[in-house]
């Protein structure tokens, strides 16, 4: 019979089906998390092909990540079979543009075999340009220029399009000049950077009507997922492409816009009806992903945002647990607690593949990685490196390895010129030759070499200086803790300065990672113990496939779902991040709250939020305040528990009579102007000093630790 829906549409609800069947004209699907937007978009794609409304090669479908593109390809493949192979235009904005640009490269002065350079190359190029142009790269570092150029490209701006403000933002009015020189340099190298992929294609569409018309004709249908996170250049590019046929279907959720720091503009989704008059707007309200409790918790939280369209979500799912909010003593206990919970899930038959830990900042993964390796839980890190594989961590470890083991040539090679000391690859070559000749380790051979006149005087002095530092650090290692040693090494080697000179957002993350490394080292008495621990962890990296817990940032988790989600570190200054608090603006705080909404709504069955009462920062215990987002969760949707056992002995050890352990509490206290949420409100209204509030509450709980502290000490 005619009314039996095709398989890809069988499960869809009425509004979803409407979005699938309204193939002609603009369609906007604006709906909350887990309502089946991506599912409907996938069905629409299958429908277009199955109904022969277009050939697979005549559909443009953009997703936010490669992973999402892969998943969509797989799902469509299940419905339409091999036809999906012929879909060259299903991918991310960047992958689609890279493909187009191969065909039209000559229009922007490139050859079709152009290379796409990575961030490292980009920085090297910029550094050279900065030096060539006599700009002080200490004051105006390459990273800053790279950030500005990316920003301009995200906004669709060529060098000639910059206004005075943009131009002023680098080296007193030389932004435009440097951007222009950089673009010329890239062209000479037959290369482009990531941002160019979009910008070049936008320029081509604007300047070559025939090319634009070709693609306008080709793409009978355009589909876009996660539309709330498109930036200006992507928006302009799409609008040009869709202007002719207007068969464009975009889906998104204003509450999940979390990439404004990369230039995304939520306004794009709000403007859609203006850009495409007569657009069909489909609202989905039934959530198929999460239990009612999880959904209510997330929906309740997001109502604290002022800038939103507002929407209702409901679910037919019954049963389910409240969102658990667990207060723990400190970071290690947080990791221990999550480990126990995961082991329990495993015993109950849950698959590790369905478990995720979502963190706000990369450095937070370290504590979990260490714990999981210790107790044998397999894990994978998505969208980043494992903690001990990150470049800055490897650098720090290389210094420590050379201190512990002077014959560690690989480690010495890694850092002999990191930070830059002006020792080039020629010097390294000579060092190696000499090492082979004399059968000495690289470091020792270098010292030997420095006594000959084979090297220029400057290189000789630098090498001797470095090796003397190592002698000093080896002595220091005898007298101090590994963590103290590492701090000294980072300061004295110039590594800290190198990071400080670099004002990019990335470098802040790298500094955070290094302090996290120091935190890890606090737990070891000797450098040898710590390095052994690290090598065991590195060895562990070569594990077999199998079920694994996923650890990733909340940002990277967009669009995904897991049965069980753990959200650690919900403390002021961690989440919301210190940066968002320092900026103090409402907008950055609301973006953090949207991120919280995204995080909670990844959970299908169970969501567990954790916050620790203490974090150790540079060997100092700092008390933390639970995130305002915890307070903003509707009370009836959560259960709270506090299990502060593990660290009670530490508490005693650290709290002597005449020392206020909360002396530094105020450091994590946000700026008053940015304070939001009932707890903060209360504190502000009553004029109650937040620090006192915390001290009082912590002291009250301190009494109840006494009992557990005793057992704790008894156990170990
Ligand atoms: P997000 O905003 O997080 O990207 P989304 O709106 O894209 O979420 P989907 O990922 O498409 O939501 O769907 C969420 C879950 O609901 C998936 O497991 C999907 O298989 C399921 N689902 C979607 N539509 C239906 C439906 N009509 N009936 C049953 N399950 C559905
Ligand atoms: Mg989705």
Image (cartoon, rainbow, N blue to C red):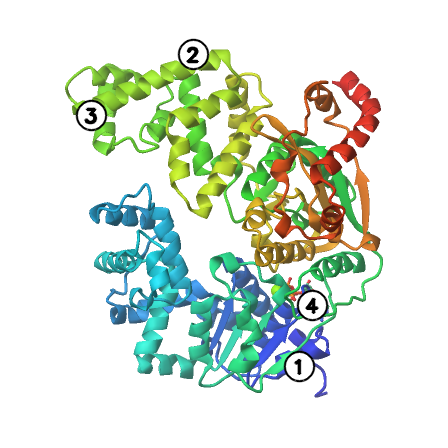
Q: Say if 229 sits above or below 701 in the image.
A: below
- Residue pushed farthest left? 453
Q: Which mark is residue 35?
A: 4
Residue 20 percent coordinates (x, y): 62, 79
Q: Say if 130 sits above or below 700 in the image.
A: below
Of label 2 and label 1, which has the lower sequence position? 1
Q: Which of 202 and 171 is in front in this view?
A: 171
Of label 3 and label 4, which has the lower sequence position? 4
Of label 3 and label 1, which has the lower sequence position? 1
Q: Name the residue under label 3.
A: 458
> Visible in this render: residue 499?
yes
Q: Nearer the viewer, residue 88 or 81?
A: 88
Residue density around tag 2, few if under 14, some if 14–19, many if 20 or more, within 10 Å: few
Q: Residue 78 carries which label?
A: none
Element class at badge 1:
helix
Q: Which mark is residue 475?
A: 2
Q: State how far apart marks 3 and 4 are (Cα).
A: 65 Å
Q: Residue 18 carries which label?
A: 1
């Amino acid at each position: 019979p005619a009314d039996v829906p095709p398989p890809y549409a069988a499960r869809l609800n009425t509004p979803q089906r409407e979005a699938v069947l309204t193939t002609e004209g603009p369609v906007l699907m604006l709906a909350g998390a887990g309502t089946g937007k991506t599912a409907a978009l996938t069905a629409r794609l299958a429908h277009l092909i199955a109904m022969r409304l277009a050939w697979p090669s005549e559909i443009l479908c953009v997703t936010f990540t490669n992973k999402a593109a892969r998943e969509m390809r797989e799902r469509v493949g299940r419905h339409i079979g091999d036809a999906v192979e012929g879909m060259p235009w299903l991918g991310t904005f960047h992958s689609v543009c890279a493909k187009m640009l191969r065909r039209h490269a000559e229009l922007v002065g490139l050859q079709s075999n152009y290379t796409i350079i990575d961030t490292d190359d980009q920085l090297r190029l910029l550094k050279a340009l900065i030096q060539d142009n006599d700009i002080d790269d200490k004051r105006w570092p390459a990273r800053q220029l790279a950030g500005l150029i990316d920003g301009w490209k995200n906004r669709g701006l060529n060098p000639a399009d910059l206004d005075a403000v943009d131009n002023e933002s680098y080296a007193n009015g030389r932004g435009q000049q440097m951007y222009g020189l950089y673009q010329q340099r890239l062209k000479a190298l037959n290369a482009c950077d990531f941002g160019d992929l979009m910008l070049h294609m936008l320029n081509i569409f604007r300047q070559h009507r025939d090319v634009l018309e070709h693609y306008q004709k080709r793409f009978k249908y355009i589909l876009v997922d996660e539309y709330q996170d498109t930036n200006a250049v992507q928006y302009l590019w799409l609008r040009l492409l869709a202007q002719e046929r207007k068969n464009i279907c975009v889906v998104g959720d204003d509450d999940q816009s979390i990439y404004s720091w990369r230039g995304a503009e939520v306004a794009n989704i709000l403007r859609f009806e203006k850009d495409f008059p007569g657009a069909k707007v489909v609202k989905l309200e039934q959530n198929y992903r999460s239990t009612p409790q999880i959904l209510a918790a997330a929906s309740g939280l997001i109502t604290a945002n002022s800038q939103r369209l507002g929407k209702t979500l409901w679910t037919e799912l019954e049963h389910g647990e409240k969102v658990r909010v667990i207060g723990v003593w400190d970071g290690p206990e947080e990791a221990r607690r999550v480990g126990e919970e995961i082991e329990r899930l495993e015993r109950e038959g849950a698959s590790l593949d369905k478990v995720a830990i979502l963190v706000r900042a990369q450095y937070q993964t370290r504590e979990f990685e260490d714990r999981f390796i210790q107790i044998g839980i397999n894990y994978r890190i998505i969208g980043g490196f494992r903690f001990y594989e990150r470049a800055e961590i490897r650098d720090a470890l290389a210094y420590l390895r050379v201190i512990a083991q002077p014959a560690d040539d690989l480690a010495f090679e890694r850092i002999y010129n990191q930070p830059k000391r002006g020792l080039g690859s020629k010097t390294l070559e000579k060092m190696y030759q000499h090492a082979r000749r004399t059968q000495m380790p690289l470091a020792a051979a270098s010292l030997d070499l420095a006594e000959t006149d084979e090297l220029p005087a400057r290189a000789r002095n630098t090498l001797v200086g470095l090796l003397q530092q190592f002698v000093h650090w080896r002595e220091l290692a005898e007298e101090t803790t590994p963590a103290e040693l590492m701090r000294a090494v980072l300061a004295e080697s110039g590594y800290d300065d190198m990071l400080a000179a670099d004002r990019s957002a990335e470098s802040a993350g790298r500094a955070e990672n290094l302090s996290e490394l120091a935190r890890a080292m606090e737990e070891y008495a000797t450098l040898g113990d710590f390095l052994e621990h690290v090598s065991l962890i590195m060895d562990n990296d070569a594990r077999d496939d199998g079920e694994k817990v996923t650890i990733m940032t909340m940002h990277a988790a967009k669009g995904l779902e897991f049965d069980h989600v753990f959200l650690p570190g919900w403390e002021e200054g961690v989440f919301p991040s210190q940066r968002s608090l320092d900026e103090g603006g409402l907008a950055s705080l609301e973006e953090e709250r949207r991120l919280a909404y995204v995080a909670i709504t990844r959970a299908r069955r169970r969501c567990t939020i954790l916050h620790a009462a203490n974090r150790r920062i540079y060997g100092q215990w700092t008390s933390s305040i639970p995130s305002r987002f915890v307070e903003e969760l509707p009370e009836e949707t959560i259960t709270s528990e506090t299990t502060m056992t593990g660290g009670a002995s530490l508490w005693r050890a650290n709290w002597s009579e005449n020392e206020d352990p909360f002396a530094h509490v105020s450091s994590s206290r946000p700026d008053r102007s940015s304070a939001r949420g009932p707890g903060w409100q209360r504190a502000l209204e009553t004029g109650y000093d937040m620090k006192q509030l915390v001290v009082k509450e912590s002291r009250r709980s301190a009494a109840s630790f006494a009992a557990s502290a005793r057992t704790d000490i008894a156990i170990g």
